[in-house]
Amino acid sequence: MKQIMIGLAVLMLFTACGAQPESGAELFRPEQSAPAVLEENIEEISAVLMQDYVQIYETYCGGAEFDADTPSAKAMRNFAYGWVKEQNLLDAFAVYKGADIQHYVLPSHETGLFCKTVFGQAPALDMAVSNLRFDADFTELFPTPQLKIADCEKTPDGGWRLVVNRSLDERDYYPAEYVFAPAIYPDEVSHFLEGKSQQTLWRFVSVRNLPMPQKGKNAQVVKINTAEQLTDLADVVNSGDWDYQNNVYLLESDLDMQGIDFTPIGLYDASDPRDPAPKGFCTTFDGQGHTLHNLSVSGGGLFAGIGKNGFVANLNLQSAVINANPETDASGGIAGWISGGSISKCTVSGTITGSDIAGGIVGLVQNSVVQGCRADVTVTGNGVLGGLTGIIEGSGSTLIDCTVTGEVTGQTPYIALGGFAGKFMEGTIDRGIVSVSVNGSAQQDCIGSFIGIAIGKNGSYSGNWVGCFYDIDAAGTLPIAGLTDKQPTHTSIIGLTNAQLLKMGAI
């Protein structure tokens, strides 16, 4: 104590005299107190968020997009189940039949408290707890992808924003953005939250898919010279690959597909919302005027479907055989369906058989453009059948300068038969030409020489006919449109004899 007092006296003397201690002199300094606020450990917090929230949400909710203002009752319900299971609390809610578990029933009050804690006072909360019975074998909706944190940052309200990369079977899925806010621990004790502290409780604010990162790949022009290369294209697209959309595909020569076991291009259907693979074929295929001979497929067509930004042009199919497939809804020479895409200057000759929807060029047209196409086909089967297309729907659907010859025959039971289209709900047919024999043994009110059924959704028909022609010899006694609210006017569609159509070069 005496030494401390002497040291302080010397220091005060130096200070009073404006002097500094000599270099190297050691002075006693009182120890600084530790900061009152302990810095947050980002690694620990991100680990809790990943294990207790993100992993469970991805596994039991399929990573479904979520917003606190418009929450999903199904996501909240499934997350509660996943939380209870992963916390090893599920056995308490098992319902037995003998020695076997039949199902699990979560208590509605406990589940409500839990969901209110981790999702907030959500509008869908009551719906989320209205059905809390889960089958004994209930598991994840989709396979759980591999998850890796790409970014973690604090939000202004004291919460956290995580960017999580996903992948499955060596394929990248959409990255996810998870936003959390601090949760308020409930006043009432919740069995679901045993062992959890205020510091480890978080509330979901939002979950959303982020755009796929650009990989820097340049668009490529891929030239197809052989049947094997065409089959390779089908394999790539049907694998769920999404990079192919950067490419343009050119058919460089005529191909004979006789004996080739060909699978339609664009079969892959991404049922998992985290999967970025597009539905259908979604880029350009230019046939450059070349012909595919003797193509034979089961269901669909050359393309199972053509999706957004898909463009197929300048292609001919000769002696094509498209067989019905009960697992495929729509069949057509070029494609089973088209939605948000275009088909231009394509021709098809051959036979098309459909079990649901079928047409010579394409089975279903939905908000798409079909331009300058020609079909000389025999279309048979059940369902909705048309010489060019089975069904036209969507106000954005436009069919321009298309010609159909051949035969459409319905096999009982069928729904609608038409020389141009089986069912025309919305859109525009501009300068369509039909010389087709339409045959059906029953339901005569659904058969038309041009259109089988022309009725819109909810009884509101908005289809337009502009400058169309039909063969009155082939039509016989059939009306232009079978079942319709209003037959087209004589100015929108004109009947001519077969000889007149031939003379004017229309068929």
Image: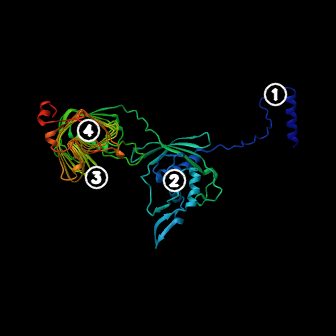
Q: Which mark is first along the chain, 4 or 1?
A: 1
Q: Secondary structure at mark 3?
A: loop
Q: Position of residue 237 (x, y in %)?
A: 31, 42
348 in relation to 131, above or below: above
The residue where tag 1 is placed is: 20
The answer to the question of whether label 4 and label 3 lie on touching residues, with beta carbons closer than 8 A, is no
Is disc 1 surrounded by few (<14), some (14 to 19) or many (20+) residues within 10 Å? few
Is residue 223 visible to us here? no
The answer to the question of whether label 1 and label 4 lie on touching residues, with beta carbons closer than 8 A, is no
Q: Secondary structure at mark 1?
A: loop
The answer to the question of whether label 3 and label 2 lie on touching residues, with beta carbons closer than 8 A, is no
Q: Which mark is first along the chain, 2 or 3?
A: 2
Residue type at the position of mark 3: Glu
The residue where tag 4 is placed is: 488
Is residue 150 visible to us here? yes
Q: Position of residue 296 (x, y in %)?
A: 19, 46
The residue where tag 2 is placed is: 76
Hey, which residue is sitting farthest top in the picture?
A: 18
